């Protein structure tokens, strides 16, 4: 972890606003080349700043990605390789802040910023203090009644719109309905996305001498895909492209993909169903885009709008049927490649694209660097790179699953190459992302030297106390290939005592 360094600047310290979506594919923004989707406010943000077109979630799943953001450290240090937290590696401190340093919000408070956090934060434990002065959580489901009472959005509905409080899934039905097209049970003005935008506008409008650091984290377009009226009927499924699939042996080389498909009732979705889901997914993104527009208008209404740094990004993507896969947690581009937009009119160039490798870990350095106390930790100084200077990373690493277990996967991005190693069976993939952005052509046998080189690079990255459990005899540890037993994931409203389907239909009415 690097020590903070003062960044010299004649510009007063900016306001800093982070806006995050959940499960938002990198290609679902019109300004970045997708003509099928309408995103005027994301386009507005892209045109007023720098878009990093090779930005990644280095552990593409909700909890892990969020800990890379709030710590500026990678999974071997955070020990968050999935939606759970692994024990410390030998010699590591017990808690995440002890290993990584203070969380981002606390760091910005210590630097004299007014801080607010609104939306989904997916902390573990759920009530963890992340360091925000104003902290308004809206999580996607509730494990018990206490968690529902501790959720700011759920209480907003219960207290101000009690007519909707009977709804068990405020963001849509889950379990077997996870990848079924839906319509929000809430009007557009009362959804969790509108609530988050309203709270953000209130915080941005607050007067004060100190600058603000705000973090707005939308729940969508994470499934269920349930946009409100009229966004549920904004896109014609017959105009949506079909999923892109390659050879099944490559698409499902990662055994987690068919396992996850089954877990969420998505193991036999056909193309017509997939097009309907994409239409609802795009509808949810356009709705969030409208909410983002109100936030951007609130920023622009202030006298210091030009000295406000805005960063938009997502925690990971969604396969949406590409590679015959749904959800995330793989190292295919549609899962781990994320949108990443930076805007700071007083300092950064406009309407610019950077192909330098970036990742969510870099967000810590962006905020602290803009505040004049650069703390890179395990990331890179993207602000310097966005300004045309700085040193870009040569290699970018992704990790999923605890090193030394069959679930461990490591990804290396280098120039045009992507290399993926899976400990379960020691399987490997090599793609040329520039020539083959949809990752349909396995190049392992065509370029064995490149694959060997990147595997050695991965070994070097793991050759430390945090990663060495993933190594054996100077190479990545391999386990005999095994498919995981299939199971379903049930996500009912446990805060209301709903645990699953009844044994007999009539039992539900007893």
Image: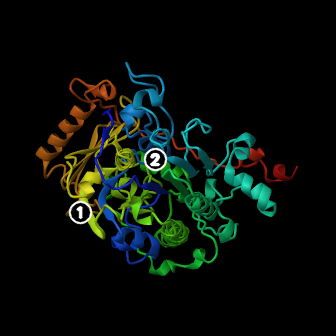
SS of the residue under disc 2: loop
| Image marks 2 and 1: residues in contact by CB distance under 8 Å | no
Left or right of 283? Residue 137 is: right
Numbered badge on residue 244: none
Residue 485 image position (x, y, % from top left) = 50, 40
Residue 389 sits in quarter: bottom left
Q: CA distance from mark 2 to mark 1?
A: 24 Å
Q: Nearer the viewer, residue 510 or 450?
A: 450
Note whether 217 is above or below 349 in the view shown: above
Q: Is residue 164 visible?
A: yes
Note whether 48 is above or below 96 in the view shown: below
Residue name at image x 62 percent, y 38 percent: 127
Answer few, some or many: residues within 10 Å of disc 1's Cα (few below 14, many 20 plus, some between 14 and 19). Answer: few
Residue at numbered disc 2:
61
Residue 451 sits in quarter: top left
Answer few, some or many: residues within 10 Å of disc 2's Cα (few below 14, many 20 plus, some between 14 and 19). Answer: many
The image shows a total of numbered marks equal to 2
Quarter placement of the N terminus: top left
Residue at numbered disc 1:
436
Q: Is residue 22 visible?
A: no
Residue 145 image position (x, y, % from top left) = 75, 42
Residue 102 image position (x, y, % from top left) = 45, 34
């Amino acid at each position: 972890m690097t020590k903070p360094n003062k960044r010299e600047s004649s510009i007063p310290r900016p306001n800093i606003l982070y806006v995050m979506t959940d499960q938002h594919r990198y290609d679902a923004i019109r300004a970045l080349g997708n003509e099928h989707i309408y995103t005027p406010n994301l386009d507005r943000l892209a045109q007023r700043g720098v878009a990093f077109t090779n930005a990644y979630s280095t552990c593409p799943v909700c909890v892990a990605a969020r800990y890379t953001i709030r710590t500026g450290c990678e999974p071997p240090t955070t020990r968050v390789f999935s939606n759970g937290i692994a024990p410390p590696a030998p010699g590591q401190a017990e808690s995440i802040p002890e290993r990584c340093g203070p969380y981002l919000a606390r760091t910005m408070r210590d630097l004299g910023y007014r801080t607010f956090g609104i939306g989904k934060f997916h902390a573990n434990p759920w009530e963890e203090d992340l360091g925000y002065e104003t902290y308004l959580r809206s999580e996607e489901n509730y494990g018990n009644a206490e968690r529902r009472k501790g959720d700011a959005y759920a209480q907003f509905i219960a207290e101000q719109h009690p007519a909707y409080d009977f709804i068990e899934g405020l963001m849509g039905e889950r379990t077997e309905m996870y990848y079924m097209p839906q319509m929000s049970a809430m009007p557009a003005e009362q959804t969790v996305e509108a609530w988050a935008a309203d709270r953000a506008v209130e915080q941005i409008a607050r007067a004060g001498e100190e600058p603000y650091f705000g973090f707005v984290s939308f729940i969508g377009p994470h499934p269920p895909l349930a946009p409100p009226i009229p966004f549920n009927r904004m896109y014609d499924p017959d105009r949506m492209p079909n999923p892109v699939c390659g050879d099944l042996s490559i698409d499902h080389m990662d055994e987690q993909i068919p396992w996850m498909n089954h877990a969420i009732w998505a193991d036999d979705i056909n193309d017509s169903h997939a097009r309907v889901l994409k239409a609802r997914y795009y509808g949810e993104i356009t709705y969030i885009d409208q909410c983002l527009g109100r936030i951007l208008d609130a920023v622009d209404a202030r006298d210091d709008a030009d000295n406000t740094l805005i960063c938009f990004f997502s925690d990971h993507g969604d396969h949406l049927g590409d590679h015959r896969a749904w959800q995330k947690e793989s190292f295919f581009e549609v899962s781990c490649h994320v949108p990443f937009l930076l805007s700071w009119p007083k300092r950064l160039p406009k309407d610019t694209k950077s192909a330098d490798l970036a990742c969510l870990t870099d967000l810590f350095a962006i905020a602290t660097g803009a505040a004049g106390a650069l703390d890179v930790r395990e990331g890179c100084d993207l602000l310097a790179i966005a300004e045309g200077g700085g040193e870009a990373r040569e290699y970018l690493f992704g990790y999923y699953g605890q090193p030394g277990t069959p679930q461990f996967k490591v990804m290396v991005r280098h120039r045009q190459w992507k290399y993926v190693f899976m400990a379960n069976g020691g399987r490997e993939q090599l793609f040329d992302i520039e020539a083959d952005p949809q990752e349909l052509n396995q190049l392992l046998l065509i370029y064995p030297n490149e694959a060997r080189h990147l595997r050695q690079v991965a070994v070097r990255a793991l050759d430390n106390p945090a990663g060495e459990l993933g190594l054996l005899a100077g190479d990545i540890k391999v386990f005999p290939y095994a498919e995981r037993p299939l199971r379903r994931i049930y996500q009912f409203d446990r805060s209301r005592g709903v645990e699953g389907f009844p044994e007999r239909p009539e039992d539900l009415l007893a």
